[in-house]
Each structure stands twice: as C-alpha cells, then as structure tokens.
Amino acid sequence: MTIFSTFGLFIALSLLTALLLAVIAIKPWLRAPRTHSKPLDNQLLGINVAVFRERLAELKQIKTVASLMSITIKIKT
C-alpha cells in the first residue's frame, strides 16, 4: 500500500463516518410528527409565569428595602 491509497482510504472512511453520523442525528427530526395529536398542556407555563411574577415582587421589595437602608445610612453620616 502506498501513502496515497492509505490517505484515500482514510478520507473515504472519514466521509462514510460523517455521513453515518449525520443520518443518525437528522433521522429523529424527519420522523417527528408534523402536527400535535394532543393539545399542549399550558398548566406548567402558567405556573412558571406565576412563580416569575412572585419572584419579581420579592425583588422589588428587596430593592425598596435596600434603597431605604441606603437613605438611612446617608442620613446618619
């Protein structure tokens, strides 16, 4: 075997491996259903939004307390 046949074999096997991995990666997307047979459950989304709003309210309270503390520190000094 010469260096060119070894290099050619390497390139051929590399391309074959890349093609095989591409088919394995793309195949699930091609098999995915086009439409949802069941309606989506938005309950978790609603819970997440509620938790997010509660957290924003908590952060607003913390910010208010921190600004009041900084005002009292400025007044004392």
Image (cartoon, rainbow, N blue to C red):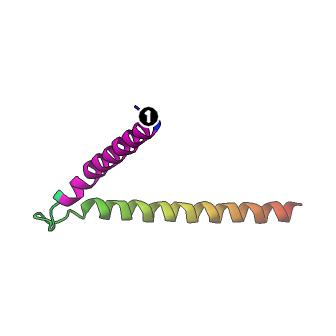
Q: Position of residue 27 (x, y in %)?
A: 22, 54
Compared with residue 49, is residue 20 higher up or lower down, i.e. above or below?
above
**Residue appearing at x 40%, y 45% in the figure:** 11
Query: In the drawing, does residue 74 fall left or right of residue 41?
Result: right
Closer to the camera in the image, 12 or 24: 12
Q: Residue furthest front?
A: 2
Answer with left or right where residue 54 lies relative to residue 20. Answer: right
Residue 28 is left or right of residue 46, and the answer is: left
Q: At 89% across and 60% down in the image, what residue appears?
A: 77
- Asked if 24 appears above or below 55 in the picture, the reply is above
The boundaries of the magenta stretch are 4-30
Where's residue 61, x and y in %? 57, 63
What is the crowding at mark 1: few (fewer than 14 residues within 10 Å), some, or many (at least 20)? few
At mark 1, the secondary structure is loop
Residue under label 1, please give it.
2
In the picture, which quadrant includes the N terminus? top left
Of residues 52 and 4, the one nearer the viewer is 4
